[in-house]
Amino acid sequence: MIDSKIRDKYERLNLLISSPGGSVFHGISLYNFLKGAPIDVWTYNFGSVDSIGVVIFCAGKKRLSVPHARFLIHGVRFNLSGNVIFDEKQIEEHLKSLKIDQQNIARIIADTTQKPINTVEEDMNNRTTLNPNEAKDYGLVHDIQSNLFPIDADLSVIGENIQQLPQGMPFGITIPTIQAFTRSQDLDVGTF
């Protein structure tokens, strides 16, 4: 979906995000893709941007929120279900992966907000919840506004909420719910 908008020479991709979070792997991959894509990306919180959704939100060159929204920053975890058996090396491998994911998320948020990484790590450990004004003070949000897009905007769904993996899988993940609209030259700052 995004690649076709880039091929069609759209100047800006506007991502409307409301997400309970989900897969760290998919979230960081999407963040890296959006940051490296040859298109301006603006992100909008139109409900709740939680967990890995915050990382995706950070991909926006311009980051906006509606007045009645929230952000949740927390640490990384993994879920076990059923009779999962690990040997010592597997536990070590999972712990290393968990720590690297935690560091990557903290670095992304710190780079976006210009906050020291140790402050972000502490906020992650404290499971920090921010309203839009607090998120603006934090550096996550540039502006708070009610109007998200003009009536003639091209709306496209680029992600769907996917439920837990089948029973017996060691890690339950969900893909963040992301809706996008794209529009080229007629969307500028202050248009909304």
Image (cartoon, rainbow, N blue to C red):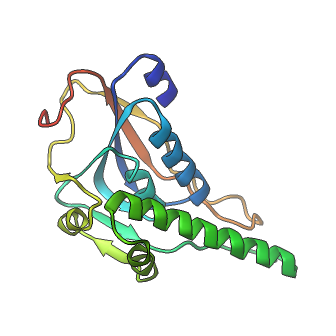
Q: Position of residue 24 (x, y in %)?
A: 57, 59
Residue 134 relative to residue 77: left or right: left
Residue 145 visible:
yes
Q: Is residue 129 found left or right of 149 in the rendered image?
A: right
Q: Position of residue 127 (x, y in %)?
A: 41, 78
Q: Is residue 162 above or below residue 189?
A: below
Identify which residue is drawn at 61% across, 55% down.
25
Quarter-of-image position of residue 135? bottom left
Q: Which residue occupies 28% across, 65% down?
A: 70
User: Would you say 158 lies left or right of 15 here?
Assistant: right
Res 138 → quadrant: bottom left
Report the residue at 16% width, 36% height from top: 189
Does residue 117 lie above or below 165 as drawn?
below
Task: Out of 62 and 145, give the one closest to the viewer.
Answer: 62
Task: Using residue 174 as the reference point, say whether residue 131 is left or right of it.
Answer: left
Task: Give the quarter of the image for residue 49.
Answer: bottom left
